[in-house]
Image (cartoon, rainbow, N blue to C red):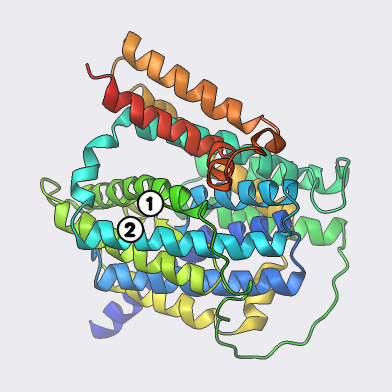
Amino acid sequence: MKVHNKSNTSMETLQWFVFLLASSVALPIVIGSVFELEFHEVAGLMQRTFFLVGLASLLQGLFGHRLPIMEGPAGIWISIFTVMAMTGLQHGTSLDKSLQLIQTTMIVTGLFLLLFGLFKISQFILPIFTPLVTGVFFFLLTVQLSGTFLQGMLGLQGDASTIQLDSATLAFMTFFIVLGLSIFGKGWISNYAVLIGLAIGWLLYEWFIKPERTSTEMPVFQLPEVFAFGMPIFDVSVIPIAFITALILISNVVASIVAVKQTLGSDILDIRSQVNKGTAFSGVSHGLAGMFSAIANVPLATSAGFIGLTGQKKKMPFIYASIVLMIVALFPPIVAFISSIPSPIANAALMASFVNLVGLAINNTTLEKLDTRKMTIVGVSYLFGMGAMFLPIEVFAELPSYLQNLLSNGLLVGTVLVILLEQVWRE
């Protein structure tokens, strides 16, 4: 019986590990292509991201909300990384300096989240995250990131100014493989659609394109580097961005806790304590992400789908898998191998995974009947949020730096608008 239990635990741990890995592998490659990082820099970013995903998940599972919810790289942070890279270049700031400023932004956001959790402010912020607000946020997030993902799929990054047909063809094949497996696949095939699609796309890319790579010597074992992008740079512009981002991220904590507790069959009538603790430890993980120059993590509601699909309701395999991921991250050759996934393939897999997010956005927005008030709020938020995405960065040049980074980010503009309009224009 003990051998059987150990075997089950081992298999459940392996499944959790693959899920953690599949949800973390693509975003560091996307960030690497946006900031034109060298291969060894992408490998370092991926190592730190894996380590932080494992550590953040472990801390939340043991001391935070204490649920088997994966902490994964946040889509909103990809948006902030991308926008701050563009605004920095427009104002003559190097990509390296932008990365140092982003470190500061993550640390300040973490401080806000920590305070919201410790002083139990999170529970009082919950009412502002209505279905309309979350629907608008998810939709604007997909709109803003779809451009970045599509550019990556077409090979329009770095020095490339025209579509790279070979890599683009394989990227679109990967997109439809991931999408097809997630929709029509059964059991574990559907759950690991992103990982399977990445593997197939990667093999095809290696077979047909045969990319050249320079071999670099690396240690077998290495601890994650602290402030790998350089020492943080402080600018007053990060404060409003950090504050608004912290408010929005609380919705991730709430949605994940509710979704997983429902899947586990637990009572969800009073989750205030778990929300406060989860928010506080999200603040800790954000501070660590800034310190380790990684991508900040948030609780992923997709964990509920994984639990429901596999029937794995025990927490310990999740804890073990988090520890295993941290250990794997300490061996650079393993991480470097994973980091060699081509950027077009990684972007394609992420683009496919965002299809469900569009559906979630529409579902949340239409959860309640769209009367004149709601349609007006949605319309104004969409028009100004998406409109800001298409404005040239230089139009904000005369404004203070904190307003430049805020107003040039259409996701933040639209989300702030829908929150304000919902609160000011009462039914």
Instruction: Decide: is 120 above or below 337.
Output: above
Which of the two residues, 358 or 308, is positioned nearer the viewer here? 358
Q: Residues within 10 Å of mark 2 (few under 14, many from 20)?
A: many
What residue is at 70 percent from the left and 65 percent from the top?
96
Q: Secondary structure at mark 2?
A: helix
Q: Secondary structure at mark 1?
A: helix
Residue 237 seen in this snapshot = yes
What residue is at 75 percent from the left and 70 percent from the top?
39
| Residue 64 drawn at (x, y percent) | 25, 66
| Residue 211 drawn at (x, y percent) | 86, 63
The residue to which callout 1 is attached is 246
Which mark is drawn over residue 113? Answer: 2
What residue is at 27 percent from the left and 27 percent from the top?
423
| Residue 305 drawn at (x, y percent) | 36, 49
**184 on left or right of 340:** left
Sequence-earlier tag: 2 or 1: 2
Which of the two residues, 200 or 427, is positioned nearer the viewer here? 427
